[in-house]
Amino acid sequence: MTLFVNFILAMLPIIWLIIALCGMKMTGYKACIIALIIAAAEALFLWKQEAVDVATGGLEGFAMALWPICLVIIAAVFTYNLVVYTKNMEVIKRMLVSVSKDKRILMLIIAWGFGGFMEGMAGFGTAVAIPAGILCGLGFEPIFAATVCLIADTTPVAFGSIGIPTVTAADITGVSQHDTASFVVLQLALMAVVVPFLIVWITGKRDGAKGLKDYKGILFITLMSGISFVLPQYLTAKYIGAELPAVIGSVCSMAVTILLAKFLRREKETKFDLELSQEESEPLSVKSALTAWSPFILVLFFLIMTSSIFPAIHDPLAAVKSDVQIYTAEGASPYTFTWIATPGVLIFIAALIGGLIQKCSLAEMLKILMDTVKQMSKTIITIMAVLGTAKIMGYSGMTQSIADFIVGVTGAFYPIVAPLIGSIGTFVTGSSTSSSVLFSSLQKSTAETLNMNPLWLIAANTVGSTAGKIISPQSIAVATAATATVGKESVILTKVMKYFVLFVAVYGAVALLGAGFV
């Protein structure tokens, strides 16, 4: 009975967030501040944690929220706002619609392909912020753009930010990174093919598609968009490692989607086409195209060159860091601030150079940055509250109480809920990596108790964490900030909840069925 009571009490901050955001339609930052207060009170009075440990645990969450998470989100939105200010977003729009005017194909290229690429390179919300901003620039309705980008930013998350979630899961449990990455791709494979269809179906339905006849000619492109992501991803995971599957998979998917769209749907007009002016239909010079894309090209260049793929550059930059003891409990590890080799700093540098290329003065860029910070102020509060709550729940033992109850109830059928546990970790923390930190060891020990392959359940945790990304308050806060819809968090959460249920159900079934064969 104690296990059940602890489970219910530990769930209270999460239950509150669901009620506040879905039922009460409360704005995100207000709901998350109250969740933080609930978690702190429970940690203090029910889990009997020392007041100073509760306070410093929350403070460590605030630090993590600001650096690197809010830093990278502000940098990403600043980059987008800069390109809009210089009117180069119109150039990018013309380039994209030169591939296809069909909104469904544009969604595949931007939300799925480019979003997956940004997730694989940078993570930390860039895969939602930048694609959603571009879609709004193309004329897509903001809430719709945010919703689709959240759904698209799922399967790539396992290998986000150069593979950190999967690498962390393997390192914590002492298992092979290659084998873990391969199992992660196998468990993600079905949904990695399904997600492009979901994106196309949602986009088509919004514009009045009623049956298969309305999708004639695009289903094959959609299928290949998914397959061309999965196959390179698996080969990369198996033979190269966990760092690049999402990057290589998304680049291959974008290339295949663009080629098929150019050759199979050339000059075919549909009711799903964007309406373009004469100016938007005119061809562009190579110089203007490169100028328009320069901030994003530089983001790609800096992120690749400073990644672990190039240790001669990465290692010296990564060594520029400060270890600060924030959390005060016995045995606590210091929090590390990485000052240069972090995506936010690199994106800022790329944006500044790109802005100069686009003839934007430093004074103008400073004003754009200040406006961006103002635009995102409520988002920053939301993310700080979420990370503070996550740290308090984790350090006090509340998160472990949730997992312990689920393990105790499910027994031999545990694999079906292993992804659910991973998703809870991401829902609470907003980070697939944090979910790996919280629950990978639990997954391994449970697998050994049940005489199952530990690698399979460790991978299931990472796979489940990608589903939690859809409904995480942090992710939704990023989406609303990028699309200027702050205050509409509850609307977006309501729209994406059913897709979260679908993802967790499919991942649970895959984990259960596969557990008997590996």
Image (cartoon, rainbow, N blue to C red):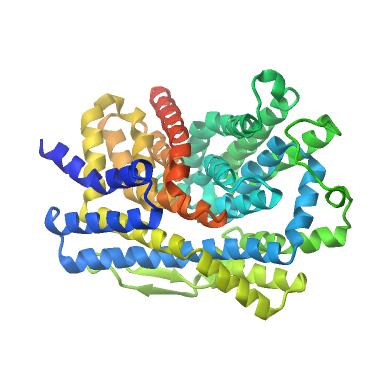
Q: Quadrant of residue 315?
A: bottom right
Q: Position of residue 434 (x, y in %)?
A: 38, 52
Residue ID at (70%, 72%): 353
Q: Position of residue 174 (x, y in %)?
A: 38, 48
Q: Would residue 341 be seen by someone viewing this image from the given angle?
A: no
Is 117 left, or right, of 168 in this rendering?
right
Residue ID at (23%, 54%): 38
Q: Would residue 499 be seen by someone viewing this image from the given angle?
A: yes
Residue ID at (23%, 46%): 12
Look at the image and tell me in which quarter the C terminus lies.
top left
Look at the image and tell me in which quarter the N terminus lies.
top left
With respect to residue 95, does 264 lie above or below? above
Is 40 left, or right, of 68 in this rendering?
left
Q: Quadrant of residue 421?
A: top left
With respect to residue 438, does 260 lie above or below? above
Q: Quadrant of residue 270?
A: top right
Residue ID at (86%, 62%): 287
Is 372 left, or right, of 442 in this rendering?
right
Q: Position of residue 36 (x, y in %)?
A: 28, 57
Q: Nearer the viewer, residue 275 or 264?
A: 275
Q: Nearer the viewer, residue 419 or 206?
A: 206
